[in-house]
Structure formats: C-alpha cells, structure tokens
Image: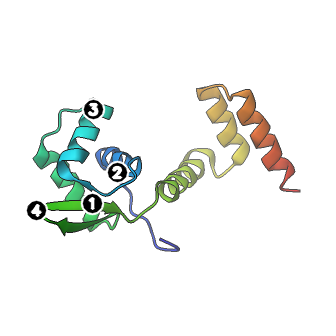
Amino acid sequence: MGGKLVKALTECEVVVMKCIWETDHDMALPEIMSKVNTRYNKEWKPQTVSTFLTRLVKKDFLNMYRQGRSFLYHPLVEEQEYGKGQITKCADLWCNNDADLFLSALNKQRKLKKEEIERIRALIDGLD
C-alpha cells in the first residue's frame, strides 16, 4: 500500500487476517471460520467472523468478490507490511524509537537464539 496510511486492527481482526495471510488462495467464510477456530482455539460463529471480514473490507485490508454462490476474500495488505508498521509503532511507543532498548526488551522477554544474534551482527556490520 505504498505510502498509504495502514489503519490499526483489533486483536480479533488480526487473528482473521493471520489465517488469511497464511493461506495461498482466496478464501470463503466457512474456510476462514474453520481456520480461525482451529488455529486460535476459538468458537466463533459465522456471523462473528462475517462481522470481522466486513470491517476488514471497510478498512481496505481485504477485497471481497463473488465466485458462484460464495464470496471470497483476498488480502490487499501484505502481512510483512502490516507487521513492520506494528513493530515500528511498538519501538516508537515503548522504546522511544531506540533500537538498543528494543532489542534489549526483546532479549529480556525471550532470549535471542545464537542464529538470531549472528544475523543481527551481520545486519549491523552491513550498516557501516
């Protein structure tokens, strides 16, 4: 969505989007509901999922189109694009946009793996 302001999602909307992002095809309501309920241990009814899908269409995260008797949903925002925005917002809000505070907080939450540390070092070395 190059340069376009990406609207914030509720936690429930993120759950629906994650299921859609993790699938390599456009999905109809029954498949989305099944994935959400299975993957996230929910017991959402069709009307609940339909409400979240309607909101996601209004927020320009999804395109809805008819195919036969079903409506299919196609993502308009890439998962990485949304994730990067959330990480940036988190770093700005909680770490005053300070990268070392952000990494330190992440490491305290869960220890960074050796491979992650090596990739971070390589990334830093590439900044010179």
> What whole-number distance in Å separates the C-alpha atoms at marks 4 and 3?
25 Å
Mark 3 to mark 1 CA distance (whole Å): 19 Å
Q: According to the image, label 4 marks what residue? A: 69
Q: CA distance from mark 2 to mark 3?
A: 13 Å
Say if mark 2 contacts mark 4, CB within 8 Å. no
| Res. 20 mark | 2
Mark 4 falls on what kind of element? loop
21 left or right, relative to 53: right
Mark linked to residue 73: 1
* Quarter assignment of residue 102: top right
Local secondary structure at mark 3: helix
Residue at the image position 54 percent from the left and 48 percent from the top: 90
Residue position for label 3: 38
Quadrant assignment, res 56? bottom left
Residue pictured at 23% horizontal, 60% vertical: 72
Residue 30 placed where, x, y %? 17, 46
Determine the secondary structure under disc 2: helix
Would you say the residues marked 1 and 4 are in contact, meaning their CB atoms lie under 8 Å apart?
Answer: no
Q: Nearer the viewer, mark 1 or mark 4?
A: 4
Q: Which of the marked residues, 3 or 1, is nearer the chain's N terminus?
A: 3
Q: Residue furthest front?
A: 68
On the image, the x and y values in percent for residue 55 come to: 24, 60
CB within 8 Å, label 1 to label 2: yes
Label total for image: 4
